[in-house]
Amino acid sequence: MVPSGFRMLSLLALMFAFPVLVILSLAAALAGCGQPTLPPSPPQVLASNLPVEAAFGIAVDSTTVYVWPIDPGPVLAIPIDGGTATPVGIQADAFALAVDERRIYWSDGSSILACDKSNCTGSTVLLAASQLHVLDLAIDDTNVYWGTISGDANRDLGTIMKVNKNGGVPLDAGGAPLDGGAALDAGATLDENAPVQLAGAGFPSNVAVDATYVYWVEMQAPNSGVKRVPIGGGTPSQLADSDLIGAMGLALDADNVYFMNGARALYRVSKNGGPPQVMLSSLGTALGLETDGTNLYIGADPALVKVPLAGGFASPLATNLGASYIALDANNVYVAGGDTVLKVAK
């Protein structure tokens, strides 16, 4: 016979152990299904009621989030921990903008420009003139890359371009070249760093760059899909043929290219070639697509979504959002939607 005291201790042990076992079992099951074991942290509002009708894009460096509007208006700088949104001195049709630790690079609708972040108003330089309909910018350590579409009636011809990002002709307070306009004469060189055409393209958008190639999404049939060209120039190649309906994003990791389309699907194609694979469908309207090499992040409606590249289920990081533009740093995702900017932990 088991002593009654021992039976009581055993019963108490089971009573305390059972909830722990249940929790551990649920956690293991959720982990095995690729689902998050904890709810996402609530997003932090960095700024709201911005003086723009809607944000058109977002970029981030080590200290600051930059947001630019869908209509002509000021580019705003917001501290990454929150605070006042301050105009940086750029008032432009900024359909494209990128930042590094020194400079801001942008398009005003007809040129590629740059300025030092410490004093943008007093340091603006012209990098490339006569660049119509710039749809996106990408930068590496040396160059700025972008796509253009022509101003002809068909609006279906374009180019992939680059220029040295550390050059440029200084502009005066009125936006005129301090060299008297020589930089605008017949495509003259800018500080001996002339813009270079890397490839012709049919309605290019969503430009991205790695150490070897410039990538873009080409919208013009019959060759619509993902293309690339060596960063030093050469013959373009097509990585993915796709009947794209409005490209909405392009992201790279070491091995693959990821892209979305207006049909609300997420695709992956190997940089070595091969057929594109559908990773997600029925995303909802999505605008932002970024990767940190471990996960993909998608600014979709109605949620900011994280997709593990190694496999597993997509999970929401924040909900009740509209389609949003996003930017990443090491620990957070920054979201621009409407007149509000959020910071969401990865």
Image (spheres, grey):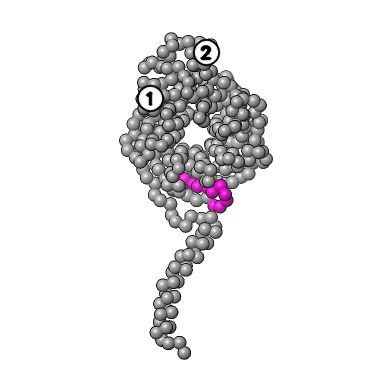
Q: Could you say whether the residue bearing mark 2 is in a helix, strand or loop?
A: loop
* Residue that lies at the very extreme toward the bottom in this rendered image: 1
Point out the tag, 2 or 1, that comes first from the N-terminus. Answer: 1
- Could you say where residue 311 lies in the image, as x and y percent from the top left? 57, 51
Q: Is residue 328 above or below residue 5?
A: above
- Residue at (42, 83) in percent of width and height: 6
Q: Could you say whether the residue bearing mark 1 is in a helix, strand or loop?
A: loop
Q: Is residue 191 above or below residue 49?
A: above
Q: In front: 310, or 316?
A: 310
- Residue at (48, 65) in percent of width and height: 24
Identify residue for label 2: 188
Q: Which residues are magenta?
A: 302-313
- Could you say where residue 297 lies in the image, as x and y percent from the top left? 50, 44
- Residue at (57, 43) in percent of width and height: 266
Identify residue for label 1: 120
- Could you say where residue 30 lies in the image, as x and y percent from the top left? 51, 59
Give left or right: position of 174 versus 34.
Answer: left
- Residue at (43, 9) in percent of width and height: 180
